[in-house]
Image (tube, rainbow, N blue to C red):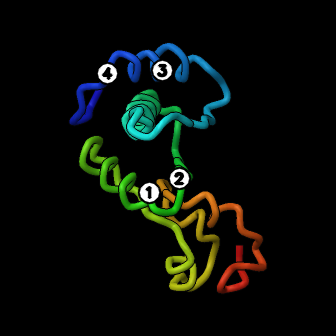
Amino acid sequence: MTSNVDPLPNQSRAVYESMLPRQPLRYVLADDAGAGKTIMAGLLIKELKLRGAIERVLILVPSPLTPQWQDELSEKFDETFEIIDSHVETGQVAGNVWQRKSQCIASIDYAKRDASDSPTGRS
């Protein structure tokens, strides 16, 4: 494991005993505030990268938490994620905003918006 965290036993069990053995590799982490979702996600991402099992990651969180997730994944796991929001989409010259980076964080509301809501009219 390559991270700056010492996971709690429940976090390690969730990742290594419950999540990694399952297919397909798509997950919803939903738990109480402070339960360690960022740590579990970081552990899972690192392990899947070490196994060569993932190339792209999209993390959807409530809007106010996007910078927190970005900071924690950088600090604790040395992983760089770009926050995708309307400001990023507006500043993009062309192409699909979701394909711009391989590791993205977006708010749940931004991700579920209709393409016609896009400031550029693109999806």
- 105 is higher (above) or lower (below) than 19: below
Q: Which residue bears the numbered disc 1?
A: 65
In which quadrant is the N terminus drawn?
top left
User: Hey, which residue is sitting farthest front in the picture?
Assistant: 32
How would you rate the neighbour count of disc 4 (Cα within 10 Å): few for under 14, some for 14-19, many for 20 or more?
Answer: few
Element class at badge 1: helix
Q: Is residue 74 or residue 67 the one in the foreground?
A: 67
Q: Amino acid at mark 1?
A: Leu
Residue 71 place in picture, x, y as percent: 31, 55
User: How far is disc 2 from disc 4 in space, using C-alphas?
Assistant: 22 Å
- Check contact, mark 3 vs mark 4: CB within 8 A: no
- Check contact, mark 2 vs mark 1: CB within 8 A: yes
Q: Is residue 92 left or right of residue 42?
A: right
How would you rate the neighbour count of disc 2 (Cα within 10 Å): few for under 14, some for 14-19, many for 20 or more?
Answer: some
Element class at badge 4: loop
User: How far is disc 1 from disc 4 in space, using C-alphas?
Assistant: 22 Å
User: How far is disc 2 from disc 1 in space, using C-alphas?
Assistant: 6 Å
Sequence-wise, which precedes: disc 1 or disc 4? 4
Q: Which residue bears the numbered disc 4?
A: 8
Q: Is residue 19 left or right of residue 9?
A: right
Q: Which residue bears the numbered disc 2?
A: 61
In which quadrant is the C terminus drawn?
bottom right
Q: Is residue 92 or residue 11 the one in the foreground?
A: 11
Q: Which residue bears the numbered disc 3?
A: 14
Residue 118 place in picture, x, y as percent: 69, 79
Q: Is residue 78 left or right of residue 37?
A: left
Element class at badge 2: strand
User: How far is disc 3 from disc 4 in space, using C-alphas?
Assistant: 10 Å
